[in-house]
Image: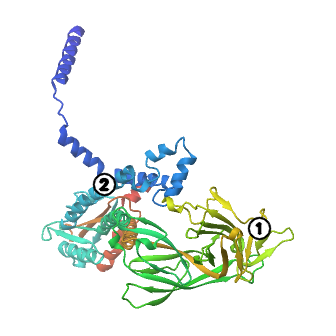
Amino acid sequence: MSERVKANHNRSEDALDQAKADAAVPSLGFKGMLRWSWTQLTSMRTALFLLLLLAVAAVPGSLFPQRPVNPSVVTQYIKDHPDYGKILDALQLYDVYSSVWFSAIYILLFISLIGCVVPRAIVHYKAMRSQPPRTPKRLSRLPEYGTMVLPADAGIPASRAITDAAELLKRRGYRVDVRDVDGAMPSLGAERGFLKEVGNLVFHTSLIGVLVSVAVGGLFGYSGQRILVEGDTFVNTLVGYDQFTPGTNFQSSQLQPYSIQLDKFDIQFDRESPKHFGQPIDFTASVTTKESPDAQAQEQKLKVNDPVSLGGTSIYLTGNGYAPVVTVRDGEGNVALQGPVVAKLQGDNYYSSVVIKVPDAKPEQLGFVGFFLPTAYLTEQGISFSADPELFNPQLSLNSYYGDLGLDKGVPQNVFELDVKDLKQLNGRDLPAGGITLAPGGTYTLPDGKGTISFDGVKRYIGVDIHHNPGQVYALVFALLAVAGLVVSLYVNRRRVWVRTGRHDDGRTMVEYGLLARGEDHRLAGEAATIRELLSNEWQDGDPAASAAETVSSSSKKDQ
């Protein structure tokens, strides 16, 4: 007997193995693979992962210098790190935000969000237009459940009870559908909280809007810097910028020809606090602006964190300093340079470095390097420093050079630096002629008949950052909408309520109700208690004591 059973078992296993071998496993195919890939890409999990990946991908942009911001710094960085500098360049880590891999993440996130939002919006639209789900057969299985009994002498039939309950739920914002009102056991289904999903959709749609706005700003925006000396005028043209960073699809025709003139720049210094004496506490630039060449001029105030807006462009005050006014005559007695020279801040009390390049001087080009002191003070050791940021005793100290400045070779140079490697020095502290020290109104004659330099006075200058981002307003609007949608989705709960009534043999009307939340809702019990209280108040002829005794809820069962 055992051998027969064993043989039958072996035959069954052989038949099963043969069936498995003969079973044809359907191939996914090209279309199936595309459908599966699209499903994975448009899932909310993938969208969140791509959002996190985008944040991580932006980190190298703050770790390494970026070529669009300062290409010279990137070039110097590669020279200083020859072992891995070119590798980073090949990986586009100096152009993070325009790199292929960053753009790929950005585009995939954009597609994923659209793929998430559109189907959810369609499903939610159909849900809003559909009727609430049918009444369950056993309401007692719902998380919140209760019963009420209306006495026979109350005169409230089942049809009226269900109609009253429907009106009450409508006043609480529920969408109500009454079923079988003339039958033996009329019921209703009600639901509310559709704004929760609307908030979710608004949140995700706003994220798409933010991405689009940022992309528009990166494609069509631009930024630049300019230094303005008192009396100078900046016209919004490409040649008017000291440094200009265009967007990817920027066109020069986008520049609106507005102008801004610096009339006066005032600084208020601290003169009361011993600890912070002499530190600047307020900056005010008085400017005259014109929206277009034919527009009327307007006087405005430019302050820190209070930009001036012109033609959709924001102009920010970012720096300031002094600009000594000098006149340089060459060896032939001609004026080779005249005007203010921007002094770069280097230390306390507006101690500033000065570089003057005079390529038009003849017979030899001239160059000057030194420093400017607003309030010069000489120590016992013969060291000069600035004792105060105000112009109480301005002084210009320079060394002079002559030779080929290298400006005619077409190689860009830093205006705040002078390469003296190929120049011959005329003046210096260690030379017989000594250094050049000038007060306002002073003139110095250079050695060997190379010319003269005069210190005519001092003006102030400001540094401005100019930003044009056509998407920033939309980004702000979408960001606010995203926050609003998130708040709504967090605080609005999706709930469903069912009420069923029936007539007892002794004339009493039996009412039972149940509540169900979509997701976790810790306020569902409170909503059930509120609905019960409203129903009791609606049917004042009922017996609250009796009905309360017969109320059953799943929470009380769990507690027991």
Q: In which quarter of the image is residue 345?
A: bottom right
Please, is residue 321 above or below residue 26 in the view? below
Tell me the quarter of the image containing the C terminus: bottom left
In the rendered image, is residue 36 in sight? yes
Amino acid at pointer 1:
Ala
Q: Where is residue 276 in the image (x, y as percent from the top left)?
A: 73, 76
Badge 1, how many Cα within 10 Å: few under 14, some, many 20+?
few
Q: Position of residue 76 (x, y in %)?
A: 55, 52
Asked whether, in this view, residue 36 is left or right of residue 544, the answer is: left
Tell me the quarter of the image containing the N terminus: top left
Circle 2: element type: helix
Q: Which residue is drawn at 30% across and 54% down?
A: 112
Amino acid at pointer 2:
Ser
Q: Which label is found at residue 433?
A: 1
Asked whether, in this view, residue 402 is left or right of residue 315, the answer is: right
Residue at the left extreme, as displayed: 182
Q: How many marks?
A: 2
Q: Which label is found at residue 383?
A: none
Which one is in front, 228 or 130?
Answer: 228
Mark 1 or mark 2, which is nearer the start of the sequence?
2
Asked whether, in this view, residue 81 is left or right of residue 189, the answer is: right
Which one is in front, 53 or 189?
Answer: 53
Label 2 sits on residue: 112
